[in-house]
Image: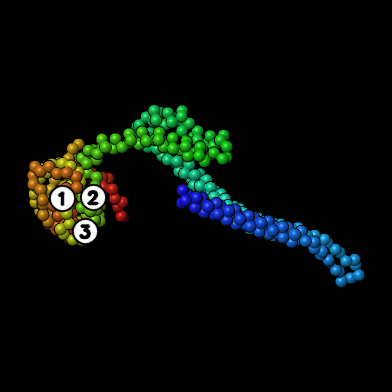
Amino acid sequence: MAKTKQYKRIEKKAVSSFINVLGRGFSCLGRFFVRLFRVCDSKLTIMIVPHSQSKVLNFQTNVFALIFSVVLLVGIISSFIYFNRQAAGSGAEISRLMSENRQTLASLDELRDENNNLLQTAKRFQSSLSQSLALLGINQSSSVSKASMNDSDLSSLFDTQQQVSASTREAADIRLLNSYLESAVQPIEQIGKMLENQETLFTDIPNIWPIKGGIGHISMQFGQNVHPITGQWYIHKGLDFSTWRSGDPIVATANGQVVTVGYDMSFGNYVIIKHKHGIYTRYCHMSTTRVKKGDMVSQRQVIGNIGNTGVTTGPHLHYEIHIGSDVVDPAKYVNVKLTK
């Protein structure tokens, strides 16, 4: 019990001390605000004395009003500086956007020019495709005409240009051009299939340069020529190909079967190949032959080498094409331009 009473006395003393300290604190705080109010409420007189004989101007105020006026003035000046900087930044951003807009307009003009060029090219493509299809005998009514019904033909494309607005004209042109090109895929695929079907025909008819790699030149043409040894006029029944050296490989100009490998006093070592459609080719003056009678050869296969055998003035290949019993000009079957 004695300890409990002692604790209660200590507790009461502590509470009393805390209340006294708190009271003194509020008292000091109250006196501070009273003094501050008295200071702020102090009267001030501001006198403006002109240098001339004009009347002196007196302004009466207090400290609180003066401080409030200074704070308000500082706030106004700070706001002016802040918004001025914001306006300057907005002006720079507007200038940047205007510059980008000018660049975008220049790019748009360039795009329009390129679009016009593309349309002109597409128009020429349409004309060339139509002519090619007509030559090949491909009916284009099911492809191009169908595209015309869907407003994807180039003729309708140019008519539509005058109907759409300027803001969407380029986009409409590109969409129509894309639609037309899609419709042109089918005829082109038909051409590809036709060429694929004709590939065998191309390899069965002599139509390539008889020297591997397309090297050399034509040293004597088909027809009437002066014989290089006798000096007399005679009919040259083939083309002479020369590389100014021996050993260059000779290739078969079409698929076929070797029917003759032999030697002749005039032609030297020679090879005759039989092709389809009654066509024969003869290769003469070889230094060596790489095929034998009865061999099946394919186009571009090496069958021998250029030589100087038989009656010649130098190493070269004498090349002939026979159709049945007729000798024809090989130049008609070789994709070269003869030099006169």
Residue type indicated by callout 2: Trp
- Mark 3 lies on a secondary structure that is loop
Circle 2/circle 3 CB separation < 8 Å: no
Q: Residue at x 19, y 47 (%)?
A: 300
Q: CA distance from mark 3 to mark 1?
A: 16 Å
The answer to whether residue 146 of the structure is visible from this angle is yes
Residue type indicated by callout 3: Thr
Residue neighbourhood size for the residue with mark 1, other residues' Cα within 10 Å, grouped as few (<14), some (14–19), many (≥20) = some
Q: Is residue 48 above or below residue 317?
A: below
Numbered badge on residue 302: 1
Give the x, y percent position of residue 141.
40, 28
Find disc 3 in the rendering and name its residue: 243
Give the x, y percent position of residue 49.
85, 68
Q: CA distance from mark 2 to mark 3?
A: 13 Å
Q: Residue at x 80, y 61 (%)?
A: 43
Q: Tell me how many marks there are.
A: 3
Find disc 2 in the rendering and name its residue: 209
Residue neighbourhood size for the residue with mark 3, other residues' Cα within 10 Å, grouped as few (<14), some (14–19), many (≥20) = some
Residue type indicated by callout 1: Val
**Hey, which quadrant is residue 308 in on the image?**
bottom left
**Hey, which quadrant is residue 131 in on the image?**
top left
